[in-house]
Image (tube, coloured by chain):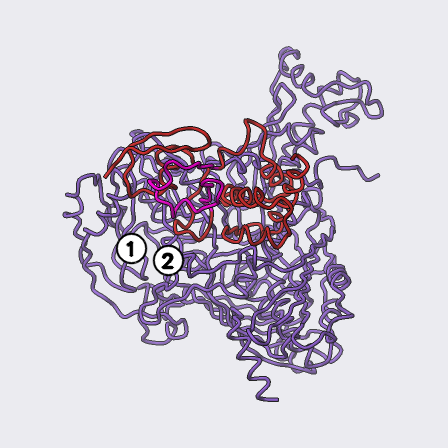
Chain colours: A red, B purple
Amino acid sequence: MKELMRFNINGVTYEEEIDHRRTLLEVLRENLGLLGTHKGCDEGQCGACTVLIDGKAVNSCLVLAASAQGKEITTIEGLAQGEVLHPIQQAFVEAGAIQCGFCTPGMIMAANAFLEKNSNPSEEGVKRAISGNLCRCTGYFQIIEAIMKAAEKMRKEV
Amino acid sequence: MKEELSVVGKGVPKIDGILKVTGKAVYGADFSLPGMLYGKILRSTVPHAKILNIDTSKALQLPGVRAIITGKDFPWGLKYGFTAITRDQTPLAQDKVRYIGDEVAAVAAIDEDTAEEALDLIKVEYEELPAVFDPLEAMKEGAPQLHDHVENNISAEQHLATGDVERGFQESDHVREDEFNTQAIKHGFLEPHASVGLWDPSGKATLWGDKQSPYIVYRKLAMALGLPQSKVRVIQTYVGAGFGSARSDPFALDFCSLMLSKKTGKPVKFVYTMEDVLVMGEMRHPYYLRTKTGITKDGYLKAIQVYALADGGAYSTIGPVSIALPAFFIDIPYRVPSIKYDGYRVFTNKGFCGSLRGHCIAQMRWALGQHLDMVCNDLGLDIAEVSMKNALHPGDQTPSGYKITSCAFTECVEKASEASGWKEKKGKLPPFRGIGMGTSSFITGVKLSGHNSASCIVKMNEDGTASVVTGATDIGQGSSTIIAQIVAEVLGLHIEDILINSGVDTDFTPIDPGTYGSRVSFYSGNAAKIAAEDAKQQLAEVASRIFETSPDEVMFKDRKVFPKGSPDKGWKLDALVRHTQHKMGKESKSIIGRGSYDSGVDFIDFKTGKGNISPAYTFAADVVELEVDQETGKITILNAVGAHDIGKALNPILCAGQLDGAWIQAEGQIFFEELLRDKKDGHVLNPSFMDYKMPTAMDIPLKNKHIFVESIDPDGPFGAKEVGEGASVAIFPAIGNAIFDAIGVRIPDLPITPEKVLKAIKKKSQEG
């Protein structure tokens, strides 16, 4: 059954008739064309679909779209300001934290939620923060390095 | 005088990095066409059966269903495969199904849910046949036969003999024989297969998909669809990682998206679920390996004999290669005077196996690398010293005929020993701490059969940038960046001046074998270098007239062209390009550089194993130090050091990423990954990332260190050899040997779970 749903995503209001069974991931990708959020396992194990809901990192494949209404949703598309990358994005590019790039948006969103609350993290803390995000290419080392570098840069910017 | 490099050898960021961090790279499932239908595949629920009838009538009546196809909709009897004798796959099952998961029918509907619903309404009538899941059972006389033309289910076999192993063992002071087993694992890429097929009214079949080797897909599509190649076009999207033939081959979704498009007149999109991916082929071959090693008391290897049995699953794919590669790799990295190998790949009623990073070499090194440690321990020898004593050196020719050109294996062993504190630690660590060494050598561009050459086009643009069209496929390993660096270096440009195609389009990019066999940097990199040099030469000739000097006295640096020794008298490169385009009268032209490369080494002869399997060889020595928790059996890697002779690190950041990734992927197989199967019907018991566990950030070593040993290969582009695949091999025996050092028990069968470790510790303490 479809119902009119309203979402606040990256500061933009979207209004669509959506089947109430659809997940937030499906709505982002199929209805709203926000394809940067990736569908990997579709059961909350790989983290490729990570987005922020009210600043908290969640697997959007496990969230019913209907329940995300009235909340502030941030996807990878909402991070950069025009051509100016977010410090985490910039650090990922510079540190080689990207190979195939499929996990990258989810990984960056998870890192973003974490760094917002932990401006001076330990490596161990970073590992824990991204432990719900699989990456088969990098072996994680350069991702951790990128997040540590981003944290440093973000501290300086504040 | 050694010329200083400006772009090559630098850790420049990936050329597609910004698109990937902003979510703008278009992967398989992101690609759409207007008016698209959505497809779903029906899979076999029985392991081995004749298909008597498929009733699609009810499913066709479901509103929203547009078409359903079965094996009968494809040219009957037309099979695809790697070689003429291994063509045993059809797009959908035609007469028989051979494993639970084999593809039987496909639906196109207005949305995925409707297509899924329609699958439940298709009735397949099977006549079940006896099935076999164990390769040893499958080889026996009277076992259920998977393919009519293959006796005893021997999918492929390989035999090799150099020297005289019997005499070698007689001349040895110590000989021992042991058994090792490895398990099935999946490639573990995060992006499920996705493709969009469009069969247009002109008869052209175009496929967009996340393919690792688009030209392989293109050839096999043409083969099984019965089309001339010019009627097939494959356009590669961004690829959510590869690691082997599970991304190189076409699968049911590719054939079916096209055939359903032909039937409906609409583009058809398939996106597999992760369950599809984990159930279907391809996966890594499980191996049983029996190895016999003969060594003298002063540590010289005399003979190695191996019996190998690989569980191939239901179809051949590249089976003849899969069973041959372990044989071909016994020759490296040591001088072994006598080798004998007998290997069999066997069909079973399970998902089929193919190549996965370190294709069947990881399994072989798991056995041989530990076996070397075992004979060394028996004789009280140091594996590091024995490794150096038997090491291959530049100029060597192995018994099989491999020509060793650049080779810094000895240096790898020395550097890994130094950086890990090998001498201080080996045999001297406290109980339950261990250190182990593993070594390996890998090929750079496997030279087995078929198409090997690569080509490239470099077009100079009038703003001084260069557009590069390569046939190489970047699946995340960074070939686009490496190739751009090479072209920039040759033309004296900056990396941001290089534009490169982000994917292969079989109609318009130079034909290229694809991403496998560790060939891309070497073959496609060389082709790019030659193409850039061709463009440079053309520009130098024009400039030489302007500067009144000879073309080889024209220098290219920092976006400028100038006569040698007079950088102030130069032109900007963009001005020279425009001059060439507009101001040379009848001789005006666009500068288009062309380059093709083939190493020219001979194909290896599969019958004898003689030949030179690769134009260059990489070498590695890894040392791992770890700790075993005697209460839980959990292993923690404290330190991992790898010294890798990769010729030249074209981009140290990318190279380090390859080495990191290779290690952690290997670690997954070593410690916990395994595709589990039901013993009665062979179905996959853990077709989900909930139960198929891969390493997370919490599972990586506490410390790791890569040492690039740059031997500068004479034929590699700027001296480079492979980096991504060989690195996944030596880590296997390094960890196995470290565990033995820690607990004094050898665990020969992968994965090394805490349970196995605890059992081993317990057994050891009982034996006292």
The percent coordinates of residue B179 (x first, y second) are 54, 76
**Residue underneath mark 1:** B43
Amino acid type at circle 2 is Val
User: Residue at coordinates 71% horizontally, 76% vertically from top-left?
Assistant: B430
**Residue underneath mark 2:** B279
Crowd tier of the residue under label 2, counting other residues whose Cα lies within 10 Å: few below 14, some 14–19, many 20 or above: many
Picture quarter containing residue B539?
top right
Q: Is residue B730 visible?
A: yes
Q: Would you say the residues marked 2 and 1 are in contact, meaning their CB atoms lie under 8 Å apart?
A: yes
- SS for dot 1: strand
Depth check, front residue: B487 or B152: B487
The image shows residue B743, relative to residue A79, as above or below, that is below
- SS for dot 2: helix
Q: Is residue B732 magenta?
A: no
Picture quarter containing residue B637?
bottom right
The C terminus of chain B lies in which quarter of the figure? bottom right
Q: Which mark is residue A118?
A: none
The N terminus of chain B lies in which quarter of the figure? top right
Amino acid type at circle 1 is Arg
User: Residue at coordinates 72% horizontally, 74% vertically from top-left?
Assistant: B429
**Pointer 2 or 1: first along the chain:** 1
The chain containing the residue under callout 1 comes to B
- Label count reads 2
User: Residue at coordinates 69% horizontally, 78% vertically from top-left?
Assistant: B377
The chain containing the residue under callout 2 comes to B
The image shows residue B396, relative to residue B521, as above or below, that is below
Badge 2 and badge 1 both on one subunit: yes
Q: Which residues are magenta?
A: A48-75
Depth check, front residue: B415 or B173: B415
